[in-house]
Image (spheres, rainbow, N blue to C red):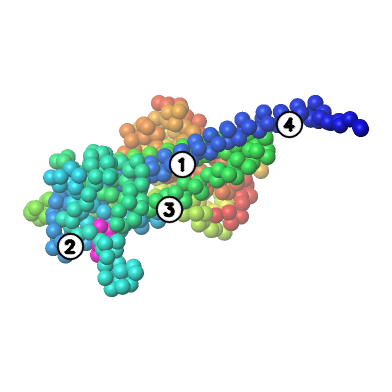
């Protein structure tokens, strides 16, 4: 009888299998950890967005307004309709928001009282979702004074009335299953009159969370790609971290803009309206009217800046390319800014060859240089000199705008061309500004095939460089 023989795989195959397992298993573990961390990051970002929405929403209301709404009878008042319209604006600003409402405390810490709901004035047919002709508990919107049990919602018991907050988990009641954020609404004396609440449906929240980072695909790529997959995953992770940081930077800068730039004109309008309502003589009314006009103009300039930045972002520009003489553009800017320069006793020097031109759009070119020269004037002291220099460099043109102003702090120079970003020392020289000017400049120049950068020394001055092709990209906006 022949002897049975077992043929074991060769050692090199065993070593290869061991090496594969040794590398693959740690990579899969790293992939799992990476996916969990990424999901947590996205979750934190979404929660931060909810908190920001509530904080911005709370600024639309005053505590004194909330105090005037107490009973269902108050739903007929113009003030109630105004509150509902403002809550509707919050809902329209973000399609993920399911509902918005206002609430106040009662004598029972576990019970709150409704003030208003964003959908409380909807027609009956829109509230009657199932069409049975009757509004059940899931369809009927709460009336002013109607109570709400917050025993299962810890955040609404205390934190929501102290600072902008978000639920730790999901909440279920007769209106649905959702996650909510809140922010206190203050009276003029600093006391809290109530809160604004913002709901996002749990299913929508989870869908966004799941779609933000497809874990199974990442795991598959890691398992099949081994070391290459590890490098790809690391690169994705870094990009996501950078994207989240960018979002956070823009969110923070936008909040600062809202607080610093919108706060003052809104305060002026509110104070003037209150003074006129309280009764004042014709002279005082004239003064308040003038202040309100200036405040509205201020708000309009901020709005126009947003619209222009959005137009740039959406690539909504279109133009017919034409030869643009750089010297003629500079002279036009000098003429336009002559009053400002004269008032500040500043000198604008232009060192540009007469025949230097590029194929672009004159209006856009003037807009770019006007923003840079105007900034140079605003951030420079009186009796200082501003220079515009330009020269041809092969198939490109380099333009420089130099000032002797306050300069940009070194750690902030990389971000000054981002949206809503202003230097930390900017407000001491130019109190108004929305942080969009240099962002628009960079976007226009880049889409024309050029680039823009700066060199700056704090306390000494700044040079902004623009480099553009002589024949710019055609119809690139």
Counting residues from the N terminus, which is met first, the one under dot 1 or under dot 2?
1
Query: Badge 2: few (under 14), some or many (20 or more) residues near its Cα, within 10 Å?
Result: some
* Dot placed on the residue nearer the N-terminal end, 4 or 2: 4
At 68% from the left and 40% from the top, the residue drawn is 224
Specify the quadrant that holds the N terminus: top right
Q: Quadrant of the C terminus?
A: bottom right
The Cα–Cα distance between marks 1 and 2, rounded to whole angstroms, is: 39 Å
Q: Which residue is mark 3?
A: 204
- Inspect this view and state whether residue 468 appears: no
Q: CA distance from mark 1 to mark 4?
A: 36 Å
10 Å neighbourhood of mark 1: few (<14), some, or many (≥20)? many
Residue extent of the magenta highlight: 117-122
Mark earlier in primary sequence (1, 4): 4
**Alpha carbon distance from label 2 to label 3:** 31 Å
Residue 351 spot, x, y in % from top left? 53, 38
Q: Nearer the viewer, mark 4 or mark 3?
A: 4
Q: Which mark is residue 75?
A: 2
Give yes or no for residue 118 being in the magenta stretch. yes
SS for dot 2: helix
Estimate the spatial distance between the alpha carbons at disc 1 and disc 3, rounded to whole Å: 14 Å
Q: Badge 4 is on which residue? A: 17
Element carrying mark 3? helix
Which element type, helix, strand or loop, lies under badge 1?
A: helix
Pointer 1 residue: 42
Q: Residue at x 30, y 53 (%)?
A: 173
């Amino acid at each position: 009888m022949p002897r049975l023989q077992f043929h074991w795989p060769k050692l090199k195959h065993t070593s290869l299998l061991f090496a594969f397992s040794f590398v693959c298993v740690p990579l899969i573990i790293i992939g799992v950890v990476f996916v969990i961390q990424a999901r947590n990051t996205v979750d934190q970002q979404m929660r931060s967005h909810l908190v920001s929405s509530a904080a911005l929403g709370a600024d639309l209301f005053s505590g004194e307004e909330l105090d005037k709404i107490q009973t269902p009878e108050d739903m007929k008042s113009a003030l109630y309709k105004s509150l509902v319209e403002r809550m509707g604006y919050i809902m329209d600003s973000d399609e993920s928001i399911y509902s918005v409402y206002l609430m106040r405390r009662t004598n029972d810490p576990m019970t709150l009282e409704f003030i208003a709901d964003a959908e409380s004035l909807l027609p009956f047919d829109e509230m009657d979702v199932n069409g049975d002709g009757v509004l059940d508990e899931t369809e009927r919107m709460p009336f002013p004074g109607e109570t709400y049990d917050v025993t299962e919602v810890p955040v609404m018991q205390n934190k929501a009335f102290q600072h902008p907050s978000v639920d730790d988990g999901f909440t279920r009641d007769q209106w649905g299953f959702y996650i909510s954020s809140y922010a206190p609404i203050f009276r003029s004396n600093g006391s809290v009159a109530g809160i604004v609440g913002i709901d996002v449906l749990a299913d929508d929240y989870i869908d966004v969370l799941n779609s933000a980072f497809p874990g199974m695909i990442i795991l598959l790529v890691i398992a099949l790609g081994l070391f290459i997959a590890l490098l790809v995953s690391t690169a994705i992770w870094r990009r996501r971290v950078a994207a989240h940081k960018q979002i956070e930077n823009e969110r923070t800068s936008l909040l600062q803009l809202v607080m610093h730039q919108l706060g003052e004109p809104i305060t002026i309008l509110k104070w003037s309206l209150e003074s006129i309502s309280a009764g004042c003589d014709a002279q005082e009314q004239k003064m308040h009217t003038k202040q309100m006009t200036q405040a509205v103009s201020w708000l309009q300039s901020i709005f126009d800046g947003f619209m222009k930045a959005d137009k740039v972002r959406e690539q909504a520009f279109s133009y017919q390319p034409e030869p643009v003489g750089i010297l003629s553009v500079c002279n036009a800017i000098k003429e336009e800014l002559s009053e400002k320069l004269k008032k500040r006793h500043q000198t604008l020097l232009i060192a540009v060859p007469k025949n230097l031109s590029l194929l672009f759009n004159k209006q856009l070119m003037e807009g770019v240089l006007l923003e840079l020269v105007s900034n140079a004037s605003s951030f420079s002291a009186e009796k200082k000199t501003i220079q515009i220099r330009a020269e041809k460099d092969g198939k490109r043109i380099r333009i420089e705008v130099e000032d002797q102003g306050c300069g940009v702090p070194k750690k902030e120079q990389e971000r000054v061309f981002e949206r809503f970003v202003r230097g930390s020392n900017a407000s001491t020289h130019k109190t108004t500004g929305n942080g969009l000017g240099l962002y628009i400049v960079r976007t226009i120049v880049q889409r024309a095939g050029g680039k823009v950068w700066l060199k700056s020394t704090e306390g000494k001055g700044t040079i902004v460089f623009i480099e553009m092709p002589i024949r710019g990209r055609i119809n690139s906006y």
